Image (tube, grey):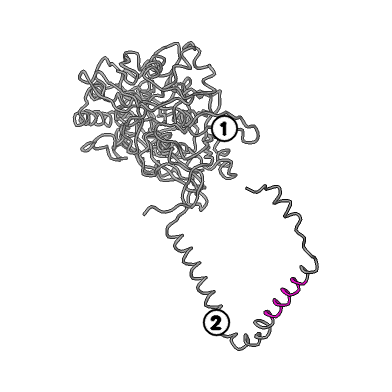
Amino acid sequence: MANPDKRWNKFQRINIKPGKFSERARRAESATLKHAHQFIVARIHNAREVRRHIAIWLMGMGVLIGLATAQFFLYQMSYTTAAGVEGGTYAEGVRSDVATLNPLYVSTSGENAAARLMFSSLFSHDRTGAIQGDLAERYSVHDDGKRYRVTLKSTVFWHDNTRLTADDVVYTFELMKDPTARIAVSSNWANIEIKKIDERTVDFILPAVYAPFPSALTFYIVPKHILSTVSPSEVRDSNFSTRPVGSGPFSFNMRQDVDGRDAYTVVHMNRNAKYYDGAPKIERFQLHLYGSQDSLTRALRSRAVNAVSGLSTSSFRQFDGSEEYSARSEPVHSGVYALFNTRTSTTLGDSEIRKALQLGTDTKKAIAALPTEYTALDAPILPRQTDLSGVEKPSIDTKRAESLLDAAGWKKGRDGKRFKDEQPLTLKVLSIKDADYEPVVANLAKQWRALGVEVVVQTVDTSDPTQNLASTVLQPRDFDVLVHELYLGSDPDVYAYWHSSQATERGLNFSSYRNGISDDALSSARLRVEGDLRAEKYKSFVRQWYRDAPAIGLYQSQLTYIHTNKLTTFDSRANLVTGHDRYNDVIYWTAQQGTVYKTP
């Protein structure tokens, strides 16, 4: 093989004569000009003769290009659409405060919302309102309804990547039972035992049959590996309450307190990519907590948030029908009642007076005073919870109401007011200061004054720390009539509100209602797992409830929800048991839109 260095040197020695190169360049230039003159310049006059054909040809090509372009866009529009896509930040505003992020101590709507987004429970509600497994993969009932075996899903992890096991469930349950932990519902679990079977299975052992028990297993599970080193008495005030670790669809990032005209708190959360039911489409979720309706409304209008929950119906109407927002009002499993104090009230202890008010009250007129349409709720149980067919509510009869009051010795004077032994028939009607309650209370007062009753209306501002509803009103039963909301849940069991055993200072039987027939029906219904038999027991209770009139049912509560049009939120066809059940399908929500292909 030749030496490459020598070849390279040989190439370097090649001589190019400048004169010969210039001569070749001139010949190439001359040939190019000759061809240009012969085929372009010399024939340019021919273009004038065919310019019409050229113009037609150019126009035809333009039309073809235009049609092809239009066809492309038309077909593209046929097969694509604007829809929610992954990513982005969803900022939701709620009128509430947040004192703790530990789900075992939640008490406000904001705390409940944060808990639902960051934590999981054994059971939750599906889109029909029925109980379904959340952490629970399945459950079975044994020992004639006294033992419930729950098996956990195998794919659940805490946000710190530790596996969630039966030990966490046992720890949470025992913590809830411990009175030193100061958890509000601890007494409810006192007689129930829990036993670990294996890493994924636990048994709940009941002292007696309790048909609604699966509905009680909706409490949130907390991590044993983080809290077990903390004394139960210190759990509430531990760092976990400010920096929680859950197993829900979103994980805690930070808490931000913002000052200014509308002071508020933001709980920042990130998507849990390892969530056992699938990673959420939203990348970040922000929960903005405001102290007033006005602040919440301003936040939505200024786009500080792109959705708000819990606006009063009067504020809700500002956005209903707007082209920028989607405004929805969805019923939940709660009801607003006019509760009569049957024990400490000097007048309503008489059942005849209560019946007169029942017969003389047109609830449709009362709820018509609300700015938006509400569903009337006559019974202490939602009709969709159990079959109440054949149970008739007493119809409105003002003349009969007047007659009952006359017979009870309350006679009308010249001024139209009723007196007995020179004492006026007076009712103190109390409610929470709320834009929704106030027009209803005003209408009730108007109707009862028409019967000759002197009505004194009072309100409690729950946002005022000096006015405590529980200690100043509910526990001492300091009212004649209380317009109040009762949570009814997914099960028809309303034992807590109407059984005589709950007519205590800390009980939820605010009417102090006592009746043997009602007590027996409510107690027996809890022991029946057969749907038909339970329904008959509840029919017996409702009939007696109408006869004794410890309260008047007014309307079913609703969740108001407003969001900007480009968001995808909860399914409007879902049956919401509570307001925070809107998050049941949060993994499918979206915060931004993009162009996607349509499914064939």
The residue closer to the viewer here, 27 or 300, is 27
Say left or right for 223 vs 493. Answer: right
Q: Which residue range is magenta in the image?
A: 23-36
Question: Which disc, if any, is residue 56?
Answer: 2
**Does residue 259 lie above or below 168 as drawn?**
below
Q: Tag 2: residue type?
A: Ile
Viewer-closest of 41 and 504: 41
Residue named by callout 1: 266
Q: Is residue 350 left or right of residue 268?
A: left
**CB under 8 Å between discs 1 and 2:** no
The residue sitting at 20% across, 20% down in the picture is 144
Q: Look at the numbered disc 1 and give the secondary structure of its residue.
A: strand
Q: Name which residue type carries label 1.
A: Val
Q: Position of residue 551 (x, y in %)?
A: 34, 30
Q: Quadrant of residue 292?
A: top right
Q: Specify whether residue 147 is painted magenta.
A: no
